[in-house]
Each structure stands twice: as C-alpha cells, then as structure tokens.
Image: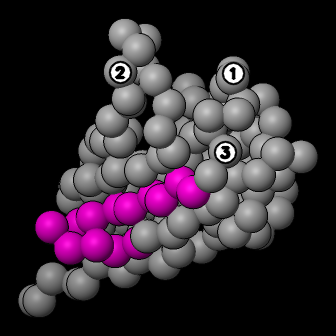
Amino acid sequence: MAKRKVEIELYSYGEYAEWDRQSKSIPRLVAITETVGAEIGTEFGYVLKIRHGKGKKLDFRIDHPSFPDKEGEVAPPFTGEQYIRSNDYEFFLGDCIWEPLEDKLGNWTMTTWLDGKIVAQKTLRLVAK
C-alpha cells in the first residue's frame, strides 16, 4: 500500500492571544492580518494544520528586524526543528514581543520546511499600536 502524501495547510496567521508554551494547545487567534499592531507581549505567527506526517521533521526559521542579542551583536534568525507527533497535527510558529519594542518593529518572515522543501512562508509586519 502506498504511503499517503503529507498534507500541509496554512490555517491561520496574524495576531494571537498570549500562549502558554508548555501547553499542547495552539494559541487562540485574535485577528487574521499581515500587519500586527504590536506592544510588549503581543503574540504573532501562523498555524499549520498537518495531516499524514507523523514522525516527520519540520525545520523552521524566523527572520526578524535587526536587534542586538545579549552580547550586543546583531541577533541571528531564530531557527529550530519540530517533530510531527500525530497524523492530525497543528504547529504554531511565531514569537512574542519583548522590550524594547522599537527594535522589534518591521518585517518578520517565518518559513517552515519539510524534507528540504518550503511548505509555508509568511511575512508579518509589526507596527506600533
């Protein structure tokens, strides 16, 4: 029997309610938008719905405006990986704004790969509220 093809849908994107990163649930969508009114604590990103992908690995990267890291150098893009834990899986990729706000404003591009191929990419523009 042939293996089923992994199905990935960019389900939602924009601003989300505060997210408990320890929870298995996805944050609640506040607004679908490509321009997010940002303040300290604003959560933003996208949700992918993935079917038939259990055991596969997603790689991701968040390209962000230039801001300094703890050593004062320009912070590199955020990168990581996530294993798909079930055949009906939701994946949230995003971030939450921290102080100072001013250097977080601008374009944030989130990209997700599966098997080396881009399966989702979205740019959200953060502007001051």
Give the labeled residue for mark 1: 99
Under mark 2, the amino acid is Glu
Q: CA distance from mark 2 to mark 1?
A: 16 Å
User: In the drawing, does residue 121 fall left or right of residue 129?
Assistant: left
Q: CA distance from mark 3 to mark 1?
A: 11 Å
Q: Find the residue positioned furthest to the bottom.
A: 2
**Residue 42 percent across, percent down from the top left:** 76, 39
Residue at the spot 37% in from the left edge and 10% down from the top edge:
71
Q: Secondary structure at mark 1?
A: loop
Q: Which mark is residue 105?
A: 3
Under mark 1, the amino acid is Glu
Q: Tell me if label 2 and label 1 are in contact, CB under 8 Å.
A: no
Q: What are the residue bounds of the magenta stretch?
A: 107-120
Q: Earlier in the sequence, mark 3 or mark 1?
A: 1
Magenta span: helix, strand or loop, mainly? strand
Q: Find the residue positioned furthest to the top.
A: 71
CA neighbours of label 1 inside 10 A, class few (<14), some (14 to 19), many (20+): few
Q: CA distance from mark 2 to mark 3?
A: 18 Å
Under mark 3, the amino acid is Leu
Residue at the spot 42% in from the left edge and 50% down from the top edge:
63
Residue at the spot 30% in from the left edge and 41% down from the top edge:
80
**Residue 15 percent across, percent down from the top left:** 75, 54
Q: Report the number of numbered marks.
A: 3
Q: Is residue 78 above or below residue 88?
A: above
**Residue 91 percent across, percent down from the top left:** 48, 55
Quarter of the image for the N terminus: give it.
bottom left
Res 28 visible: no
Nearer to me, 3 or 7: 7
CA neighbours of label 3 inside 10 A, class few (<14), some (14 to 19), many (20+): many
User: In the drawing, does residue 60 fall left or right of residue 114?
Assistant: right
Q: Nearer the viewer, mark 2 or mark 1?
A: 2
Q: Earlier in the sequence, mark 2 or mark 3?
A: 2
